[in-house]
Image: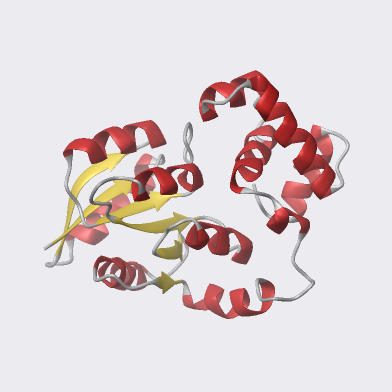
Amino acid sequence: MIRVLVAEDHTIVREGIKQLIGLAKDLQVVGEACNGEQLMETLRHTACEVVLLDISMPGVNGLEAIPRIRALSNPPAVLVLSMHDEAQMAARALKIGAAGYATKDSDPALLLTAIRKVAAGGRYIDPDLADRMVFEVGLTDSRPPHAQLSEREFSVFERLVQGEGVNEIAVHLSISSKTVSTHKARLMQKLGSHSVADLVKYAMEHKLV
């Protein structure tokens, strides 16, 4: 039996996923979480083979949670579930330790296949996305500017775009405001932005929000 923990902040989506997994005889939902902090807490006392992880949860988001999950003594495989069929986002998630990346509009049967595959130690990428990743994230010069951001810069970027201030970001990421300001300055330079409004515009143009 493959035990799955569902981390998703939208109740309707979470219930739908639980029902879907419930139909499979070899899969079982053993826990759920609606934000990153709750996920890490649940993982401390719930054994599972796979974490189905929504990438855009409040608090500690999916990308930030991946390294923390991988650092556990007996880490489950992480299958990212995202609204974004963004090749850059998928590449970033896989690079920092996710075993798979599925999008919320993919075929439900494919999601079950993905869970089984990562539970067995394999990798899974949404088929439509895999094709695009080869071209978009390949060793070409056409990589968008945000592909150059470090993980931490990307986290700060995401939070700035969502309207969080420097001090608020510092609390969420457990770093100093000064460090956040440094990341902010660097990421704005890399993205050629001069204000948070520019960042929001950039995020919308690249479908990052």
At horizontal 51% and vertical 26% (from top left) the residue drawn is 174
Taking the spot 40% from the left edge, 72% from the top edge, the residue there is 124
- Picture quarter containing residue 122? bottom left
Q: Is residue 161 above or below residue 70?
A: above
The image shows residue 162 at horizontal and vertical percentages of 65, 34
Colouring rule applied to residues: secondary structure
Residue in the foreground of this view, choosing between 187 and 11: 187
In front of the other: 128 or 11: 128
Residue 163: in sight, yes or no?
Answer: yes
Residue ID at (27%, 42%)? 32
Q: In the displayed structure, would residue 123 be above or below residue 208? A: below
Q: Give the x, y percent position of residue 166.
A: 68, 23
Name the image quarter holding residue 40: top left
Counting from the top left corner in percent of width and height, residue 5 is at 26, 49
* Quadrant showing the N terminus: bottom left
Horizontal side, residue 59 vs residue 175: left or right = left
Can residue 35 be seen? no
> Residue at the spot x=49%, y=42% of the render?
64
Residue 71 place in picture, x, y as percent: 35, 46
**In the visual, does 50 lie left or right of 206?**
left
Q: Number of callouts in the render?
A: 0
Q: Is residue 73 left or right of residue 54?
A: left
